[in-house]
Image (spheres, rainbow, N blue to C red):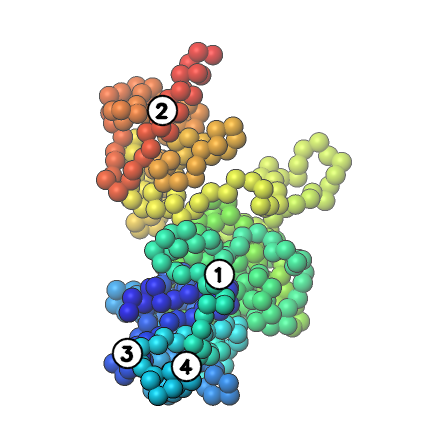
Amino acid sequence: MNHKYSWKQLSDNEVNNRLSFSGIQTNSRRIKIPETLYEFFNIDEDKNIDLIFMNGDREFSATIECSKNNKRELIWYQHLAEEISRAMWWENVSKYGKNYSISVDLYLNILKTHDQRVAPSESGKYIKCDVYKVSITGDAEDKQPEILDDKSLKKAKSKMPFGHIDGTKEGQVFASREKLGLSGIHSPPMHGIWGRESEGSASIVISGGYSDDIDEGDYILYTGQGGQDAPGGKQIADQEFTRGNKGLQLNKEYNLPVRVTRGYQVEKGPDRGYRYDGIYYVTDYERVKGKEGYFICRFHLQKEVVDSPIKDIEHPISPTERVEYTGNRVKRNVSFAEQIKDLYDNTCQICKVFLKTPIEGVGISEAAHIKAIGSPHDGPDTKANMLCLCPNHHSQFDRYTFYIDPVTLEVVGLDDYKGTSISSNMKHKVNVEYFEYQKLQYLKRQQI
């Protein structure tokens, strides 16, 4: 069976998997998990995850295994396999009587509870495991689920919302991480960062897990994730700009908001539970050696300024005034922009320069739209309408200081690059109509 097509999403908190008789045998109790379901299973680190599956009052162990090629597989063990076999046998008998066969499919339904329970891991050590309710049925048609095929993976709408969540308010206290997750503010039941490498990070929870954190209320120096022997435990390895840490990098680059929640474990947190403390922005980040001797990723966060407390002065109290993030402004596709930058290794297509940063392998580049996406141009936010440029040439390009010839791809208008063509990549197909539009805007301004 092609496991990618056997998964179906029923809701934000429920998925199912179509099973065949062969799929529950001893040697094949493995199901590949598509990346779209990583958030559902709280996958954000390159390590195995132990799960608890509850079927009625029966408890079963399962594991999400991270293979060498960084693929994830759901593995269940003998007791659950026997339960599925029994359900499959009864389903066939009830439908077909004596003429039953083993070809009829069943569905393993998995419901996310946002709960955790202490249980023994593969190594025998007791750890917190995410709990899921499972059931076995013979019909999944009534819910009209979305099939997670290749097209769905590319077009799937993000379930990770940025900014304020409708129905919640700043200062609201939630009794547990489960209640916080159900509110939509911070979905992961244990991890401190809710983010993705290709989209940014929407939310963080401060719960005293890292000794290098500094919390001054409106300003936070936040330590990223990874490198600990257990959540909130001892630092035993360096942190890298991956997973949620990479997401917070994108927050800085694209000025994305991040929700901040403080737990009862920290000094500025509530007496009990978890308090949502509003919107912050990442103003800077760094990778330095922490107190425990390992490199950590640190992020400087500043609280959003919505209203100035001083109303009767001519100038704002800060030259970097922020406004509340709302859904009616142009929203960029961060994932597409990052793909373009990765494709050109953060090297400008005009000057072919890689601008180094103190972080090894990380360069400074920007994804520039050829036909601007804002009004009145209304260009599409697609890779076919993007270039990878350095900040200087991006700024000049947006101001129509030069254009790129739609036929020859030569740079026109910059004396230092006269007769030079932009660099290209066979995997990047630009729509020449956008070059023609940009050229027309350049010519209009030459006539002013």
Check disc 4 and report the residue beneath it: 95
Q: From where the camera sits, is residue 264 visible?
A: no
Specify which label sits upstream in the sequence, 4 or 1.
Answer: 4
Give the position of the N terminus as an image quadrant: bottom left
Q: Answer with left or right where residue 420 lies relative to residue 275.
A: left
Q: Is residue 440 above or below residue 121?
A: above
Check disc 2 and report the residue beneath it: 436
Which of the two residues, 430 or 309, is positioned nearer the viewer here?
Answer: 430
Q: From where the camera sits, is residue 165 visible?
A: yes
Q: Is residue 425 above or below residue 232?
A: above
Disc 3 is placed on an element classified as helix
Which of the two residues, 160 or 276, is positioned nearer the viewer here?
Answer: 160
The residue at the point 44 percent across, 79 percent down is 136
The residue at the point 43 percent across, 76 percent down is 138
Q: Answer with left or right where residue 59 lies relative to residue 263.
A: left
Numbered label attached to residue 137? none
Disc 1 is placed on an element classified as strand
In the rendered image, residue 314, in percent from the top left (x then y), is placed at: 71, 31
In the rendered image, residue 288, in percent from the top left (x then y), is placed at: 40, 57
Specify which label sits upstream in the sequence, 2 or 4.
Answer: 4
Which of the two residues, 431 or 443, is positioned nearer the viewer here?
Answer: 431
Check disc 1 and report the residue beneath it: 194
Label 2 is placed on what type of residue?
A: Glu
Q: Is residue 182 above or below residue 339?
A: below
Specify which label sits upstream in the sequence, 3 or 4.
Answer: 3
Label 4 is placed on what type of residue?
A: Lys
Distance in Å between CA atoms under marks 3 and 4: 20 Å
CB of mark 3 within 8 Å of CB of mark 4? no
Label 3 is placed on what type of residue?
A: Ser
Numbered label attached to residue 22? 3
Distance in Å between CA atoms under marks 3 and 2: 56 Å
Label 1 is placed on what type of residue?
A: Trp
